[in-house]
Structure formats: C-alpha cells, structure tokens
Image: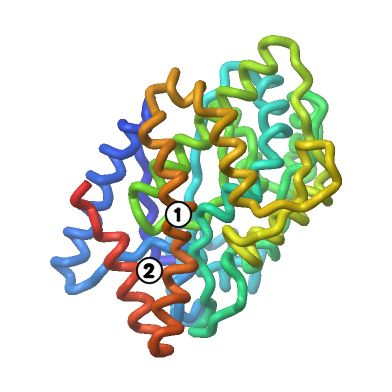
Amino acid sequence: MQSVIEIATPVCHTANDIHRELLQLRRYVCGVARTKGLRVGSAGTHPFSLFERQRITAKDRYRELVDRLQYVARRELIFGMHVHVAVDDPDKAIHVVNGLLSQLAPLLALSCSSPFWRGEPTGLASSRQMVFSAFPRSGPPPRFRDYADYAEVVGELERTGCIADYTHVWWDIRPHPRLGTIEIRICDAVTRVEDAVAIAAYCQACVKLLSERYDEGEEIPSYHRILTAENKWLAARYGLEAPVMDLGSGRRNRIPVAQLIRRTIREIAPHARELGSDRELEGIHTILDRGSSAERQLRVWNANRDIREVVAEIADATEALDA
C-alpha cells in the first residue's frame, strides 16, 4: 500500500551494525516525512486507519497478489519486522527452523505492537497476527525432515502453479534459499529502534546456538505445529503476560512467557558474547522490564480514550533516534 514504507538494512555482521544502519534509515525516512508535513510510526497496525482508503502500490507483484487473494490481501494494512540470519548449509537451515518454532511465542510477545484495529481496542496484544492468519500458507511452518523434503513440497506448489515461487510461502519462519538465510517473520513492526536491535541480537544468538548443536550432531528439539501455534496464539492474546506451555522442560505445565525468555537469554548469552552482541541482547531485559509497545499504547488509550494520542505515542517512540 502506498501509505506503507518498507526499509531494509544491507547485510550486517553484528548487532551494532544493525543499530547503526537502522538509525540512519529511520532518520532519513523521518526527515523526508517532515518535509511533507507527515510523521512516521512503526507498529503492527495503525490504530485507526481503514484499509478501504488505502491505494495499492502500482507494481505487477502487488496487483497480481490482490487479484489472486482478493479481500484477504486488500485488508492487509499490517506491518511486520523480518530478521534474516545466514546459515551455511541447507539441511542445517531446515533443522534450525524446526528448533526455532518454540521461539515463535517469545518473539511475538517481545515485539507485539498492534492492540488496535480500525480504531477499536481488540483485547489482543497483536491484532496483526489475526489479520495475517487469513493468508494462505501462513502461520508456523511444518516440520520438514531435511532440505529435500522442503524442496519437494514447495516445488509441488510451484510446478502446479499454486505459487509463483517460494517467496509466496508466508510462514512465520522460513528458509530463504536465494539469500542463504533463515527469515524470521513472526514479529510485529517494532516501535523503538533499540528494541528492534535487541530482538535481532536474540534471533542471531538463537540461530548460532542451534547451528552449533546441529554441527555437533545433537538432536535439535522440535514440537508439533499444534503446540507451537497454541503458544503463538497465547502470545498474540496476552503479550508478555502470556501463560505459555513450557515445551522444552519436559514438564507438562505453563509458565509466563517472560520467564521462558529469561531462560533463553541465559542459554544464548555465551553465543551473543562470541558474536559481540551481548550489550544489545541486554535490551531484551529492558523490554521485559518496561513492557511492549502494545502495553504502552493501551496505557495511553486508557488515560482518556483518545486514539490520536495513541498514534502520537507511536510516532514519538519511532522518532526517538538520539541513541
């Protein structure tokens, strides 16, 4: 949609590189907006905009997408953050994706920033997830045995003309063979730039941990799609307050997702140090202590029920670029 701005960093080696590039990109975009009398906000949804009033960008890819998906595509006034992490072997990439399925709920809870839809509070921390769930080939990916298994399934979709290419498979995490990356797509667009950097550092360290386990011949734990989808739903509903299933402990109980995130940080901290991103990873603790963008938006809303003030809060946090 023409009202949407997508920014992308070049390939970055460290979280500090990401921080520098995102600051530069956001400063540029916010500066251009100011010359037009506009402001920029980063969140999973615009709190009150209506998709019926948006113009579709004049590119064949988007026109064809709307023609094929109709209402499902036309109402997609939602915004996400994607993190690519390079993995050096296709079979390894598949097993790392399988291992990352248990991180869907933590990553969504950390990033949730879309409690409003069409001017109404939805009672959800991430309304974006509910809107996007109508897309075909979305949600948690299936667990594949290896890259050949993945290529056979996706190849069948391509050969039969169901999809133009593998980028029309819109799972929450997916291999990106052309780039040689794992693409983590679960996150809402993150409002504060330092939160985006912290989440990217978290993703990179998790991938490093799982990659090393694969290289050492260890079995990477993975869980049924029904279970990971249930935890994802709980995160979309409750955000950082979500009571998720503790899939990795072997105990059949539920714990606060924040507790699961803190446990993961302890596990990946040595890998973050090796990557030079331990300082950026500390930003995850800041999110847990301060709360998500969704929580902040709702606090502003509950103060006087003025949806315009919610949008101003999003823009203020997006434009806070003094770091």
Q: Position of residue 79 (x, y in %)?
A: 48, 60
Q: Position of residue 150 (x, y in %)?
A: 76, 31
Q: Residue at x 83, y 37 (%)?
A: 250
Depth order, front residue of 144/164: 144
Horizontal placement of 282 versus 182: left or right?
A: left
Q: Quadrant of residue 126?
A: bottom right
Horizontal placement of 245 versus 240: left or right?
A: right
Q: Which residue was labeled with disc 1?
A: 289
Residue found at the very far top of the displayed protein: 216
Q: Which residue was labeled with disc 2?
A: 3
Q: Quadrant of residue 64?
A: bottom right
Q: Given the image, on which type of amino acid does mark 1 rest?
A: Asp
Horizontal placement of 319 versus 290: left or right?
A: left
Q: Residue at x 45, y 35 (%)?
A: 201
User: Gap between marks 2 and 1, in whole Å?
Assistant: 33 Å
Color style of the picture: rainbow
Q: Position of residue 310 (x, y in %)?
A: 38, 77
Disc 1, SS: helix
Location of the N terminus by quadrant is bottom left
Say if 242 sits above or below 179 in the image: below
Cβ atoms under marks 2 and 1 closer than 8 Å: no
